[in-house]
Every structure is written in C-alpha cells, then in structure tokens.
Amino acid sequence: MWNITEVALRLPTSKASDHLLQPLWDFLLFQHYTLVSSPFFPVLLAFSCYFIFSVPFAILDVLGETAPLFEAPLFEYKIQKQRRPTVAMMLRTLGTAVYNHLVFVLPTVLISNVVMPAPPLPAVAPTVWELISGALGVLLIFDTQYFFWHLAHHKNPHLYRWVHAIHHNYISPFSWSTQHLSAVELMTVGFWSNIDPILLKCHPLTIWTLSVFSIWMSVEDHIGYDLPYLPGHLVPFGLLGGAMAHDIHHQKPSSNFAPFFSHWDRLFGTAVTVKPSKKIDKEK
C-alpha cells in the first residue's frame, strides 16, 4: 500500500539510469502516478489479475458442454473429467470474493492508510536481481507460512470448520474458486502478503510483479486443467506444485498443503502426485 499524496519526483541519478527496469519505473511514475500511488492500487491490481486470469477458464468450462469442438483439444488435460462447474457455482464463488473485498479488504486498506501511511514511491527502480531475489524470497516465506497454517487447519476440526471449510465446498476446483475463502483466511493471507515484502524491504515494483505472478499461480492451482505449458510443468524437478497437486488436495484433503512449492510436503510426507481413485477421501 502506498500513499496517494503527491510528492516531488526526483529525476533518476546516473546510477539509476543503469537499472534495466528504470524506463518502466519512470513510465509508471510520470504517466500513472495517481494510480500507482493510491493505497487501493495493490487491491485493484490483485483483484483485476484474479478476474482476468479466471475468465478464460470459466469460458472453457461453460462452453465445454455446448461447444465440444471448442473444448476438444483441452479436454484431455481436464483433471476431473466427470465434474464440471456450473454457472451458479461460478457466480457464488465470484460473489464471495467481491463481498470479502468490499466488506473486509477495502475498509482495512483505508484504516491502515490513515493510521500508518506508506512512504512515497522511490524514484529509483530495482535491479533485475533485486526484483527476482526479493520476489523469490517472499514466495518462499509465504509458502512456509501457509503450509503450516493450512496443515493446522486440516488437523484441527474446529479451525477447519470455522475458517477453512468454505474453500473445500467443491471437490473439483475451478478458476473462480481460487478466492472462495472465509474472511479470516483472506485477511490472514492478505496480512502475510503485505508484511512479508516489508520485512524483506522489497521495492514496490517487486511487490506488484510478485502480486501478478502469485495470483496467476493461485488461479493455476484451481483451474482444473493440467496443461503442459504452465509453470508447474516448466520448472524442473517438480519444485512447483501446480494444478494437479492442488486438485488432488481437494480430492484428498490430507495431502499437498503448500500453495506454491513442493518441498514442505515432501519433507512432511504429505506430497501426493498420483491422482486418487474415484472413491473420494473424506479426511479433513
């Protein structure tokens, strides 16, 4: 979150001009300063990415029944071919996401900006290394936080029932179900997403890039298609979970707790890479 107060933007120094990302940062600052300096910009960016990334797969799911030729090339990658989300299910999950943002996220952003305004945006862009290393660091920290949080909620029936159960309303996930979360879970995830980059002193451009990438990874986990050219397959050694791993989690809730990477599940023996049988594991 960044404050909306106009500040005098200093021209980059000679050192700043050596940054490969400086032209992009200058463009954002000088052409879209009002937008990117708004405390609501990170929320707008995150929700827009969730919406844009989800739409193509929603169309695919809807048209699959009425236009088989449209879906035929991709149907072989459908993980749970016997299950397809309905329009009502999509509207319900999208409605949950919109409600949570209007009722909980936006007021929190407003209060936070009043109590503790963020500093002005810096004039100098991050280096490519700073962007990549910062984003990777935040992803690893968040992956650790969510793994243990997620594991605890599946092991504790009270936590599961009151906080996490809503996300498991659907055995076969679909793109809109990415943010089908309770307010407690959404706010917890949002808190980590905001505090972790601050702890690592990440540049705003790093945070925004990370937001786009992490939301794509989250949507990918829920699309219900194990497509071959997604990051989950392109990154070697099975380091990323991907759609198949999270889909298995919804079928077999005692497995695959990490949101992005696979190392914690491997260490704790909860990694499952083989699709479960049609008999659904009811364990929570």
Image: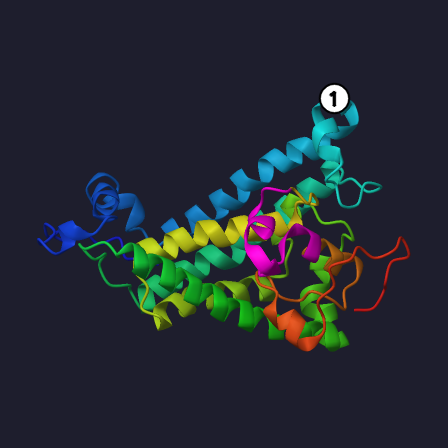
Q: Which residue corresponds to mark 1?
A: 69
Q: Residue furthest front?
A: 237
Q: Which residues are magenta?
A: 228-245
Q: Tell me the quarter of the picture where residue 164 sits.
A: bottom right
Quadrant of the frame with the N terminus: bottom left
Query: How many numbered marks appear?
Result: 1
- Of residue 115 and residue 204, the one placed in the foreground of this image is 204
- Of residue 108 and residue 204, the one placed in the foreground of this image is 204
Pinpoint residue 270: horizontal percent, then vertical percent: 72, 71
Tell me which secondary structure the magenta stretch mostly adopts: helix
Q: What colouring style does the render use?
A: rainbow
Q: Tell me the quarter of the picture where residue 260 sits.
A: bottom right
Q: Can residue 152 be seen by looking at this rendering?
A: no
Q: Residue furthest right?
A: 279
The structure residue drawn at horizontal position 21% and vertical position 43%, both measured from the top left corner, is: 23
Callout 1 amino acid: Leu
Is residue 122 a member of the stretch shown in magenta? Answer: no
Q: Is residue 20 above or below residue 120?
A: above
In the image: residue 79, left or right of residue 234: right
